[in-house]
Image (cartoon, helix red, strand yellow):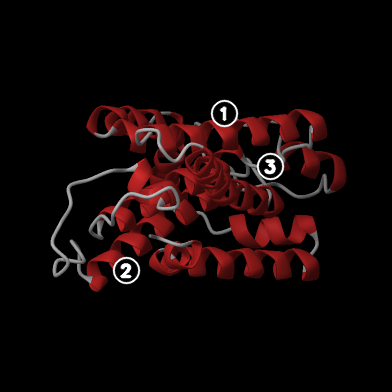
Amino acid sequence: MITLTESIKRNSVFLGLWLASVLALTIALILIDKGTLHLLLCDHHSAWADRLLPVLSDTCHWLPYALSAVLLLWRWQAGVFMSGSLILSTIITQTIKHIVRAPRPLTWFAENMPDVSLPLTEGINMHHYLSFPSGHSTTFFCLYFALTALFTYYSYSASPVSANAFWAKLFPKTQTTPSSSRKASPSVQIAVQLLFFSLAAVGSYSRIYLSQHFALDVLAGMLIGVFSVALVAHIFVAVMRRKPDTRPI
């Protein structure tokens, strides 16, 4: 049986970097005012970043759907897990966005610091409202944390299915011998988690770089994305415990 503690341990690289980033951003937001922090984070434009970061940011519009479709075709349980996490995170984010209706950096600076000219990237369609939280950051962290959880799960052999063995029931796979407890070496698992976290972090930072969001918006997106994955996992656990005799979903 894979416990919550074991799941956290297996994903400790991603979660450790995520927690460190959350704490760092929180401290920065406490110590530095909103406008100054944004300028510190976005005022480092370069030609290569102006080309790369918009492309990375735009992957948020199609990559989650493509990966969910591939997962549904490959192993539908994994596709349901991914899709459910993305749908939940989107509902939470869009609900908060339309309640708060916070101004985006371009509008906020025009109203509060009109003498400041934001460094903008040519060809980017700038938005003006619905800044908090960042939908892109939410999706990036939801997507890549879900992928991390799936990868680390499939890096281990299946354990016997029981009412409490959440991952084994959600993502059934071929039983392996006790001696083959891992499919990927620890170094590979660490490298993959580093890669997924880096993609989520850089994708989220691109929203600050492009002055589409503030650091607070990105922080909220990071929290919503990761906790959405955790909540979907918790819901599936509850379903498994209530219906222990049903076939794996």
Q: Tag 3 or tag 1, which sits nearer the N-term?
A: 1
The residue located at (39%, 28%) in the rendering is: 65
Rounded to the nearest whole Å, what is the CA distance between mark 1 and mark 3?
A: 18 Å
Q: Nearer the viewer, mark 2 or mark 1?
A: 2
Give the numbered dot on residue 125. Answer: 1
In the image shown, does 144 or 47 lie closer to the viewer?
A: 144
Q: Tag 2 or tag 3, which sits nearer the N-term?
A: 3
The residue located at (32%, 49%) in the rendering is: 161
Residue type for callout 3 = Pro
Vertically, is 145 above or below 8?
above
Residue type for callout 1 = Asn
Give the numbered dot on residue 190. Answer: 2
Rounded to the nearest whole Å, what is the CA distance between mark 3 and mark 2?
A: 29 Å
Residue 178 figure quarter: bottom left
Residue 43 figure quarter: bottom right
- Using a 10 Å C-alpha cutoff, classify the residue at mark 1 as few (fewer than 14 neighbours), some (14 to 19) or many (20 or more): few
Q: Pointer 3: what residue?
A: 133
Indicate the secondary structure of the residue bearing disc 2. Answer: helix
Residue type for callout 2 = Ile
